[in-house]
Image: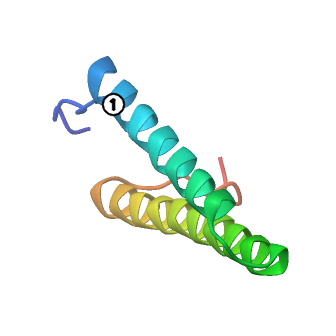
Amino acid sequence: MSDTPVKQNTAAFYGQSVASFAVAMAATAIGIYQLEADPWVRAFLGIAVLYLVTSAFTLAKVIRDRQDASTARSYSPFEKL
C-alpha cells in the first residue's frame, strides 16, 4: 500500500465553495426573473441553467473518478473475493 497522505479540503474551502455556488445560482435566478422577456423565454433559460449545472456536476464526478482510478486500484463490484 502507498503511504501517501490523503489530501482533504479544509472546512473554510468547503464553505466558500458552497456559498459561491449558492450566490451564483441565486444571482442567475434573479437575473432570469427580472429579465424583460416572455415567460416561455425565462422558462427556457431556467431549464438551460439547470441542465448546465447538472452537466457540470456529472463532468466533475467523471474527472474525479478517472483520477481516482489512475492513482489507486478501483473497486469493482463484480470481482471475485
Q: Which residue is mark 1?
A: 16
Residue 70: percent from the left, percent from the top?
31, 64
Q: Quadrant of the N terminus?
A: top left
User: Looking at the image, which residue sits at the far right?
Assistant: 40
Q: Residue at x 68, y 58 (%)?
A: 33
Q: How many marks?
A: 1
Element marked by disc 1: helix
Say left or right for 56 vs 17.
right
User: Looking at the image, which residue sits at the far top?
Assistant: 11
Say left or right for 37 vs 69.
right
Say left or right for 51 vs 5.
right
Task: Inspect the image, locate mark 1, and give the three-letter code of the amino acid beneath it.
Answer: Gln
Closer to us: 49 or 5: 49
User: Looking at the image, which residue sits at the far left?
Assistant: 4
Q: Residue at x 37, y 37 (%)?
A: 17
In the image, is residue 15 above or below residue 58? Answer: above
Residue 55: percent from the left, percent from the top?
58, 70
Residue 13: percent from the left, percent from the top?
28, 29
In the image, is residue 69 above or below residue 2? Answer: below
Closer to us: 52 or 34: 34
Closer to us: 36 or 54: 36
Q: Is residue 10 visible?
A: no
Say left or right for 45 vs 75.
right
Q: Residue at x 56, y 45 (%)?
A: 26
